[in-house]
Amino acid sequence: MATTPTSPARHFPAASRQRTSRQRLRQLVRTHPLGAFFGVTFAFSWVCEIVAFGVLDLDFVIGVFPAIWGPALGAYVVIRTRDGSAGVHAWLRRLLLWRVDWRLYLSRWELCPGL
């Protein structure tokens, strides 16, 4: 008697639904990258702000620090979803490319506290 392979969706319907919703979310990010960037950026930043000031009642300087990473997180999510790890490596390579002499950066860091 020959057996026929059964699909995992028949035995695990929740896993199949999760996979499909994940695929839909990836497709949404691929078709609307700018909207996904702003969505992730604002969601992360606002959740950080609500937790920092509404729940923990932190000082402004300490509370706003995690929220400033929202745009970087949004860019990472969109680039990782659209281009994979090769896109993230290219993005980080461009981000860390120094085009100006290091003394100029050092002078700016010395001037900032004086302002």
Image (cartoon, helix red, strand yellow):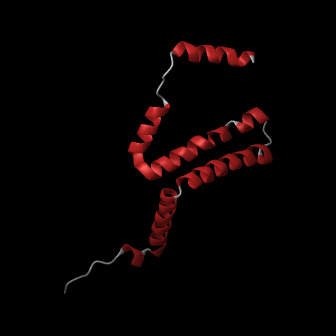
Of residue 52 and residue 27, the one placed in the foreground of this image is: 27
Q: Position of residue 54 (x, y in %)?
A: 79, 48
Of residue 33 and residue 72, the one placed in the foreground of this image is: 33
Of residue 106 and residue 67, the one placed in the foreground of this image is: 106
Name the residue rendered at 46%, 48% in the picture. Answer: 80
Q: Position of residue 58 (x, y in %)?
A: 78, 38
How many marks are shown on the rendered structure? 0
Image height check: is 37 above or below 89?
A: below
Lateral position of residue 74 relative to residue 11, left or right: right
Q: Outermost residue toward the left?
A: 1
Image height check: is 104 above or below 80?
A: above
Q: Position of residue 24 (x, y in %)?
A: 49, 65
* Quarter of the rendering containing residue 70: top right
Image height check: is 102 above or below 68?
A: above
Of residue 20 and residue 56, the one placed in the foreground of this image is: 20
* Quarter of the rendering containing residue 12: bottom left
Name the residue rendered at 57%, 54% in the picture. Answer: 36
Name the residue rendered at 42%, 38% in the picture. Answer: 90
Lateral position of residue 32 relative to residue 89, left or right: right
Name the residue rendered at 67%, 41% in the picture. Answer: 67
